[in-house]
Image (cartoon, grey):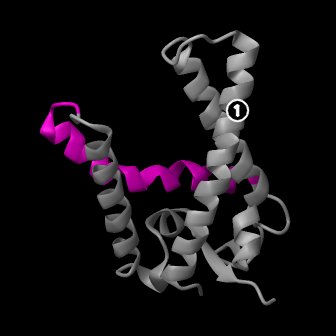
Amino acid sequence: MTTLGARLLCLLYETVLVGGMVMCTGLVYGIMTDQRQSMQGRLPLQLLIFAVIAAYFIGFWSNKRGQTLAMKTWHLRVVTADGSPLSAGKATQRFVLSWLWIAPGALAFLLHNTPPTSPGTLGLMLGLSLLFYAGLARLLPDRQCLHDVLCHTRLIKVPK
């Protein structure tokens, strides 16, 4: 078992790593497409960034070690319920379901029915969604996140 705090610290480190990947992807895309302003080619860039993030997580989770770079630092590993490494299909399922944390903020956004007036409002909604999702883990079996429960995967602590 892993503590919620260790998972959140790993998530914070993962955010820094993924942020760097997103910036590099955007730079390469901008150079290759001769992008002159941010709205030009926005959808293809967003799809490319999503694909790069998916490849990062699915690739690392489905290798024998089952660890991303941040998970190695925090000595965490993702395994199936029986303790075996994830297949590419199971890693893909976990990646897709791991986006469930956005659901409460997206629902609040849809119910509000108007776009947020500032980036801070959207950030607040997503931050509250993340806190809700992390709090939900305290109520679920073995304190695993909802996507791990649904995928029959779990995070384990790896001895140093």
Q: Identify the residue at image location x=59%, y=10%.
A: 36
Give the main secondary structure of the magenta stretch: helix
Query: What span is colored magenta in the figure?
Result: 88-115
Along the viewing direction, whichever of 23 and 90 lies nearer the viewer: 23
Left or right of 131: which side holds 109?
left
Name which quarter of the figure residue 66 lies in.
Answer: bottom right
Q: Position of residue 31 (x, y in %)?
A: 74, 17
- Residue 54 in sight from this viewpoint: no
Q: Identify the residue at image location x=59%, y=87%.
A: 1
Rendered-image quadrant of the C terminus: bottom right
Name which quarter of the figure residue 115 lies in.
Answer: top left
Magenta region includes residue 92: yes
View extreme (right): residue: 64
Q: Position of residue 87 (x, y in %)?
A: 76, 57
Q: Identify the residue at image location x=64%, y=49%.
A: 18
Q: Position of residue 96 (x, y in %)?
A: 54, 48
Along the viewing direction, whichever of 28 and 80 lies nearer the viewer: 28
- Residue 53 in sight from this viewpoint: yes
Q: Position of residue 79 (x, y in %)?
A: 70, 72
Say which residue label 1 marks: 25
| Number of marks drawn | 1
Q: Identify the residue at image location x=35%, y=67%.
A: 131
The three-letter code of the residue at mark 1 reads Thr
Work out whether 79 lies above or below 106: below
